[in-house]
Image (spheres, rainbow, N blue to C red):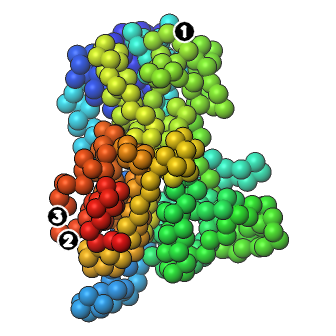
Amino acid sequence: MTEHAFDVVVVGGGSGGYATALRAVELGRTVALVEADKLGGTCLHRGCIPTKALLHSAEVADHVRTAAEAGVQAQLTSIDAAGLRRFREGIVAKKFAGLQGLIKARGITVVPGRGRLTADRAVAVGDDLYRGADVVLATGSYSRTLPGLDLGGRIIASEQALALDEVPERVTILGGGVIGVEFASAWRSLGAEVTVVEALDHLVPNEDPALSAQLERAFRKRGIVARLGVRFAGATQTDAGVTVSLEDGTALDSDYLLVAIGRGPATAGLGLEEAGVALERGFVRVDGRLRTSAPHAWAVGDIVPGLQLAHRGFQQGVFVAEEIAGLRPVPVPESAVPRVTYSSPEVASVGLTEAQARDRFGAEAIAVREFNLAGNAKSEILGTSGVAKVIRQVDGPVVGVHLVGDRVGELITEGQLVVGWEAHPEDVAGFLHAHPTQSEALGEAFLALAGKPLHSL
């Protein structure tokens, strides 16, 4: 077995892994990046990027349908499923080529193959051993399913949904979280009849209930059926379709069943526990500085318990590279990580929900204000409804920002800065928001919390 020595060996070339590698070489370390598939991982090839490209195509279709309302005569004659796929694959190919060029230009050694952790900070890939002063685990996640519900045929996960050469006429989606809601939104815009089955009482159940309620109302107007508070019982398929049975006795017939119940940590078969890395429910157990239970072994991204988001993986990768270099970076708490669901309307949030803030500080110690997008001129022009909701501690900082409406994902960075810097509404109420923009809605909510509302009562 041939040995290769590096300062840092990273296992996994997705968002967290390649961010670790890029920052580590900036800090003067030699880096080997082990990847069994393609650089960029799930986010670039089977997740974030292709799904958002699909959602953009869906948005274009909706704009054509409503063009006459804006004085533009246009007609939607058909959806070209093959064209949809070419569009998103073209976007992915460009981003992939760019990432490959960046990794090469930085002098990172890319090792193709599946890595297995061994003792003494080494990673075995085929007949070679890559030994690092530090090893960073960034192996990502996979689509979960339920016991007895096997993927295959017309029962698919998000990866197979993106590979379809057709837009389904009827589709059932199991799971009303981010992935399920985004596919429901896209497929409905492209002409499908969509039913979402969610065992909990709300869509996007991890968000503030005010946002869930707005999204559910918008979905009803769009003709998306949401079966909430009912559990899945079973599914049978034929060559022509799928029948989904629910515990309330309902049977749903559709062309496909999309299983979108979340993602699990890809940690099996990597030799982690044998090398001293403790796992919990498949996730890697880490401390507050992302150290595992094995010396000089770190973990980032979806295999670390918490939010499974690409930008969280980026941040953790940069953090670990700087920690290895002795820079002592400041950890970013989970509550400061922005969250966006790219449906129509979009849902965006950062910080605590109203219920979480009430539990942490007490009901009398928080203040909440909402500004309806109906009062925002740019939202009226765009034809979207929604709300901006802001939560503060009484006489204290803003602790939560929650938005729903088309394009509000572009506003959440301002919310992140306010929450992350523990700004008081009085600190930010004086900052101007260009008119007319949707950002004014967030400014109005801050003004109201500061006790000087302008366009609200």
218 horizontally vs 413: left or right: right
User: Marks 3/2: CA distance?
Assistant: 6 Å
Mark 3 Cα-neighbour bin, 10 Å: few <14, some 14–19, many ≥20: few
Q: Position of residue 442 (x, y in %)?
A: 31, 60
432 horizontally vs 132: left or right: left
Mark 2 Cα-neighbour bin, 10 Å: few <14, some 14–19, many ≥20: few
**Which numbered disc flags the more N-terminal residue, 1 or 2?**
1
Which residue type carries mark 1? Ala
Q: Secondary structure at mark 2?
A: loop
Rendered image quadrant of residue 346: bottom left
Q: Secondary structure at mark 1?
A: loop
| Nearer the observer, 336 or 51 | 336
Answer yes or no: is residue 35 visible: no
Which residue type carries mark 3? Ala
**Which numbered disc flags the more N-terminal residue, 3 or 1?**
1
Q: Are marks 1 and 2 in contact (CB under 8 Å)?
A: no
Rendered image quadrant of residue 17: top left
| Residue occupied by mark 2 | 436
| Residue occupied by mark 3 | 434
Q: Are marks 3 and 2 in contact (CB under 8 Å)?
A: yes
Quarter of the image where the C terminus is located? bottom left
Identity of the residue drawn at 45% across and 29% down: 300
| Residue occupied by mark 1 | 119
Identity of the residue drawn at 20% across and 71% down: 436
Which residue type carries mark 2? Pro
